[in-house]
């Protein structure tokens, strides 16, 4: 059979087209793989950054390591249940009534394999199971259509789809991480208040508590338990100082966020002014009240 030059040329053009198509497909596949590798590297960097940030949040709330996951329960193929399988018959390896040992795997139901080896009497390498237990122990994957045909293997997952799902999960983790950081930047005491308003409220509350103590000292002075000098010293210096340091400690303990850059302001001059004004004002208000009632 002779082939003309035109047929050779057509075949060469066809082979050349197939070769170019193969090269283009290989180039496209290579570019897709590069894009996938770049996406995987970028996602890995994001996950590493998220892990470091979560570690910082954990240390801020006093959790250095995540709790250990509970151990999985033993499955049907666990060694503890395998030990409960029935073993070889108790009479394995015993001689027959004629005095000669029975052949492995024949006659009296003695197992074959390692049990038939010399010096290994009574060792059952393959324990005999009843028919029902054998069917339970050796499950067969059956297709939905039945008929004992093995089920069809699931299709391979698309890497691009899996990477897109991982990227969405990383975005969700970033969103929850930002919410956790916002919560960690709020103190436990009056979290919705501004730092200045919180400091004023704390110092004023401590000053009010000191004012109550002033009234108690005044009543004690009225019955002669406290002299005038001690009362004046506590009103002018003692109780205002106690109120100031009390507010300072409260702001340092409960007014400090779990995560904050630097030391939060405690407004010491403002607190000093409030405490050293509230206590004497409470004493003056008491005097005015007593004189008004008289």
Image (spheres, rainbow, N blue to C red):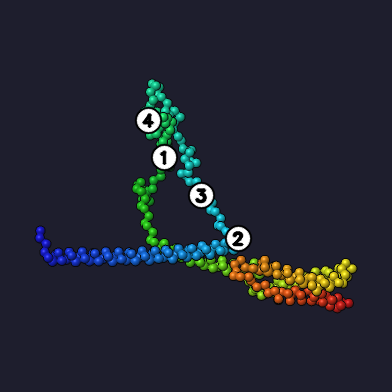
The mark nearer the N terminus, 3 or 2, is 2
Closer to the observer: label 1 or label 3? 3
Q: Nearer the viewer, residue 17 or 107?
A: 17
Q: Give the CA distance from mark 1 to mark 2.
A: 53 Å
Q: Nearer the viewer, residue 35 or 179?
A: 35
Q: Residue at x 27, y 65 (%)?
A: 23
* Tag shown at residue 62: 2
Pointer 2 local density, CA inside 10 Å: few below 14, some 14–19, many at least 20:
few
* Dots 1, 2 in contact, CB < 8 A: no
In the rendered view, would you say 208 is above or below 40? Answer: below
* Tag shown at residue 197: none
The mark nearer the N terminus, 1 or 3, is 3
Closer to the observer: label 4 or label 1? 4
- Give the quarter of the figure containing the C terminus: bottom right
Give the residue at mark 4. Answer: 104
Give the residue at mark 1. Answer: 134
Closer to the observer: label 2 or label 4? 2
In the rendered view, would you say 78 is above or below 178? Answer: above
Q: Could you say whether the residue bearing mark 2 is in a helix, strand or loop?
A: loop
In the rendered view, would you say 162 is above or below 68? Answer: below
Q: Residue at x 10, y 60 (%)?
A: 2
Q: Nearer the viewer, residue 141 or 226?
A: 226
Give the residue at mark 3. Answer: 72
Does residue 164 appear in the picture of this structure?
no
């Amino acid at each position: 059979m002779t082939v003309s030059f035109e047929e050779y040329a057509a075949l060469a053009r066809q082979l050349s087209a197939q070769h170019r198509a193969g090269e283009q497909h290989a180039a496209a596949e290579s570019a897709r793989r590069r894009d996938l590798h770049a996406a995987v590297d970028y996602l890995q960097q994001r996950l590493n950054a998220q892990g470091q940030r979560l570690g910082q949040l954990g240390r801020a709330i006093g959790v250095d390591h995540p709790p250990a996951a509970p151990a999985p329960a033993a499955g049907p193929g666990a060694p503890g249940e395998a030990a409960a399988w029935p073993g070889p018959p108790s009479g394995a390896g015993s001689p027959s009534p004629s005095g000669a040992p029975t052949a492995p795997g024949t006659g009296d139901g003695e197992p074959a394999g390692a049990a038939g080896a010399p010096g290994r009497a009574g060792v059952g390498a393959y324990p005999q199971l009843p028919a029902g237990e054998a069917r339970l122990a050796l499950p067969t994957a059956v297709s939905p259509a039945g008929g004992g045909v093995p089920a069809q293997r699931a299709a391979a997952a698309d890497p691009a789809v899996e990477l897109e799902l991982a990227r969405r999960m990383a975005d969700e983790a970033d969103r929850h991480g930002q919410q956790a950081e916002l919560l960690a930047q709020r103190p436990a005491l009056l979290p919705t208040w501004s730092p200045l308003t919180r400091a004023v409220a704390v110092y004023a509350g401590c000053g009010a508590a000191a004012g109550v103590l002033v009234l108690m000292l005044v009543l004690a002075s009225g019955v002669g338990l406290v002299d005038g000098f001690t009362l004046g010293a506590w009103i002018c210096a003692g109780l205002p100082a106690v109120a100031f340091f009390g507010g300072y400690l409260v702001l340092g303990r409960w007014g400090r966020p779990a995560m904050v850059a630097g030391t939060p302001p405690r407004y010491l001059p403002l607190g000093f002014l409030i405490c050293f004004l509230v206590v004497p004002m409470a004493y003056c208000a008491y005097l005015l009240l007593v004189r008004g009632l008289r």
